Amino acid sequence: MRAAYNLSVLVVLLMAVQAVSGLAFPELYRDEGFVRDTWFGNDWITLMLAVPMLGAALLLERRGSLRGRLLWFGALGYSLYNYAFYLLGATLNHFFPLYVLLSVLSVAALILALAHTTVSEVAAHFSARTPVRLIGGYLVFVAFGLTSMWLVTWALHVFGGQPTPVAPEAFRLVAALDLAVTVPALAAGGLLLWRQSAWGYVIAVIVGVKSSLYLLLLSLNSLFFIQRGLAEAPGELPMWGSLALATCAATALLLANVKGQWKKR
């Protein structure tokens, strides 16, 4: 667990360095238009929410907080997804080694931390009154909605000649990561939580925290695009904003049902 913790401290520091550098020196990004503006929102959410969350989670975990440990897992999930997005989607730039390092460190820290966590003990700390079907059903609903949205848009483009909302390559990247990573995690977490499986509680928190942060990021980017004239109001803000609020509420409700302290070993 010490290795997982130390790697996570390094992740916090590197996330802060990358986000601050991206905001202070936007010319280091070599993308144009929509993609370049996307990195601006990503860096803001990372710096203002993800970095403080992961730092606070590590401090809480050291004090025996199970909520801290679960938030730690979720923040690592966000870091892994976010820097995979940069790694695969950004034009080759000065940050490339950081993208690789953050992706590797995040997945290594998450694997090590989960390997030293007994999920049955985690599940035992959740209240018997936890609304597992409400939260689990919501996660499955979001998984189904994302799948439908991406596949319908893909089909309209490929078979109907309709334009994608953004450039096809940018659309492909986001759809691929969502369909290959986010959707399976949402569906697995929701279904396992519905069945009150021990892994369901852990996966649901990880995907809930990750999705909450990313939906807030999409909401912020939607607002930026409107302000910069790249989209007409209200753009995609109502969709992403509503999902962000609902997912944050579901994740907070799940974490609110954690009882007692984590017995550290």
Image (cartoon, rainbow, N blue to C red):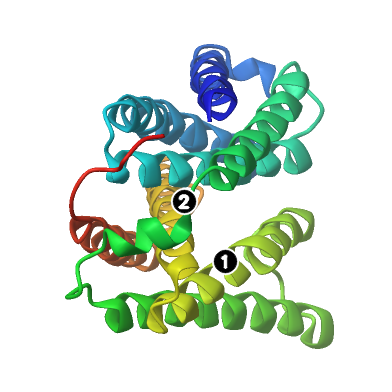
Question: At 31% from the left edge and 63% from the top edge, which residue is drawn?
Answer: 124
Seen as rendered, the residue at the extreme bottom is 160
Classify residue 67 by image quadrant.
Answer: top left
**Is 178 drawn above or below residue 212 in the view shown?**
below
Crowdedness of circle 2 by 10 Å Cα count: few (<14), some, many (20+)?
Answer: many
Q: Name the residue under label 1.
A: 185
Where's residue 264, x and y in %?
Answer: 36, 35
Q: Which of marks 2 and 1 is nearer the N terminus?
A: 1
Picture coordinates of residue 172 (x, y %)?
Answer: 75, 61
Q: Which mark is residue 148?
A: none
Q: Is mark 1 on a helix, strand or loop?
A: helix
**Pointer 2 with pointer 1, Cβ within 8 A:** yes
User: Residue shown at 82%/87% (left/top)?
Assistant: 159
Residue where numbered disc 2 is placed: 210
Q: What residue type is labelled 1?
A: Ala
Q: Quadrant of the C terminus?
A: top left
On the question of residue 129 being in view, the answer is: yes
The residue nearer to you, when weighing 151 against 101, is 101
Where is residue 144? Give x, y as percent.
53, 82
